[in-house]
Amino acid sequence: MDHGPSQARLRAEGVILTVVLAIGFDMVARRYRLGIDWQVERCLPDTRVVLIDLRSEIPERDGLIAFRGQGLAPIFPDGTQMVKILVGPAPISCRCHRHGRPSTASR
């Protein structure tokens, strides 16, 4: 029974596909996070799931902004991912603690 070239080719294609998918997943995972609000009473009543873009530059008015909360204990531990609506005017400049850029989200 000859399994030579065809089985070797299938293995090679499988390895290549696995590597390409792993690289693609890594690229997406470095830029985006999926935020899920499991609370019964949510801060954003219409929104349970948000896609957080870690590379977004400037937040927009009435848009969502994501940040890591600090000093909200005992309700939330430091570093909890928070998403809020930016109601006031968007800042012209923004001081951020995450790589010098804000993280914004979109629904």
Image (cartoon, grey):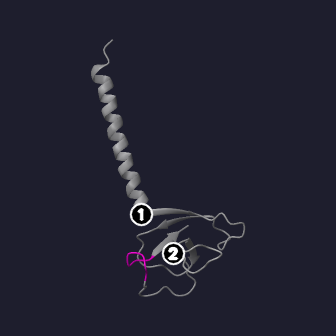
- Looking at the picture, tell me which residue is in the foreground, 62 or 99: 99
Q: In this view of the protein, which residue sits in the foreground, 79 or 103?
A: 79
Residue 49 placement: quadrant: bottom right
Which label sits on residue 31? Answer: 1
Secondary element under disc 2, as helix, strand or loop, is strand
Residue 17 within the magenta-colored segment of the rendering: no
Q: Which residue is mark 2?
A: 67
Kind of element beneath mark 1:
helix
Distance in Å between CA atoms under marks 2 and 1 = 15 Å
Q: Position of residue 6 (x, y in %)?
A: 31, 23
Q: Earlier in the sequence, mark 2 or mark 1?
A: 1
Residue appearing at x 48%, y 73% in the figure: 104
Q: Position of residue 83 (x, y in %)?
A: 56, 73
User: In the drawing, does residue 17 fall left or right of residue 88?
Assistant: left
Which residues are the magenta region? 96-102
Q: Which mark is residue 7?
A: none
Q: Residue furthest right?
A: 40
Residue 1: % across, % down: 33, 11
